[in-house]
Image (cartoon, rainbow, N blue to C red):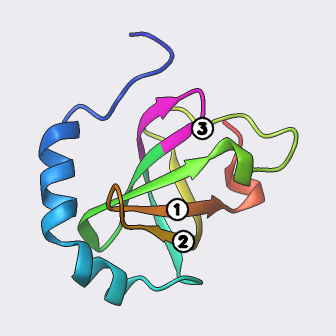
Amino acid sequence: MDEYSWPDNGVEAGTRSRAAWSATCLALPVGTSVTGEVVGRQPFGVFMTIDNAPDAIGLAEITAMHRDAVLPLIGTRVSGEVIWHAGHNHQLKIKLDEGKASS
């Protein structure tokens, strides 16, 4: 497998996250602590599932990580904080906890 990948169910996940967007924003406001699993990697960040919110997609961008951070690998459990609701693509922007941002 290539080092960078999209989530296996990217189109299906996108459709579900769009349908659940209003409920996701209500359930996971900015400042909420979240945990989940990395399901996709790109040079700009990682996509993650969110525990207890099966239709939500999180994106932790490298720009929100500390300087020496390494993008976590697919399958890594991570935790962080919701820092923004990106309505244009129905994704929660996540800032990973510092201790969880390296693989």
| Mark 2 secondary-structure assignment | strand
Hey, what amino acid is under mark 3?
Pro
User: x and y percent of residue 39 in the render?
Assistant: 37, 40
Neighbours of disc 3 within 10 Å: few (<14), some (14-19), many (20+): some
Residue drawn at 35 percent across, 29 percent down: 6
**Residue, disc 1:** 93
Residue 78 falls left or right of residue 88: right
Please report whichever mark, 2 or 1, sits nearer to the chain's N-terminal start: 2
Report helix, strand or loop for mark 3: loop
Mark 2 and mark 1 residues within 8 Å of each other at the beta carbon: yes
Q: Which residue is rendered at x = 77% and y = 57% of the image?
A: 98
Q: Tell me: 21 left or right of 80.
A: left
Mark 2: few/some/many CA within 10 Å (<14, 14-19, 20+)? some
Closer to us: mark 2 or mark 3? Answer: 2
Residue labelled with disc 2: 84
Is 17 included in the stretch rendered in magenta?
no
Whether label 2 touches label 3, CB < 8 Å: no
The relative height of residue 87 versus residue 28 in the rendered view (above or below) is above
Q: Nearer the viewer, residue 64 or 69?
A: 64
Residue that badge 3 annotates? 72
**Cα distance in 3D space between marks 2 and 1:** 5 Å
Q: How many marks?
A: 3
Task: Tell me the CA gap for discs 2 and 3.
Answer: 20 Å
Q: Which numbered tag is attached to residue 44?
A: none
> Could you say which is closer to the camera, residue 2 or residue 30?
30
Quadrant location of the N terminus?
top left
Residue 49, horizontal then vertical, whole percent: 35, 55
Which quadrant holds residue 90? bottom left
Q: Looking at numbered disc 1 in the image, what kind of residue is underneath it? A: Lys
Viewer can see residue 74: no
In this picture, which residue range is highlighted in magenta? 38-46
Tag 3 or tag 1, which sits nearer the N-term? Answer: 3
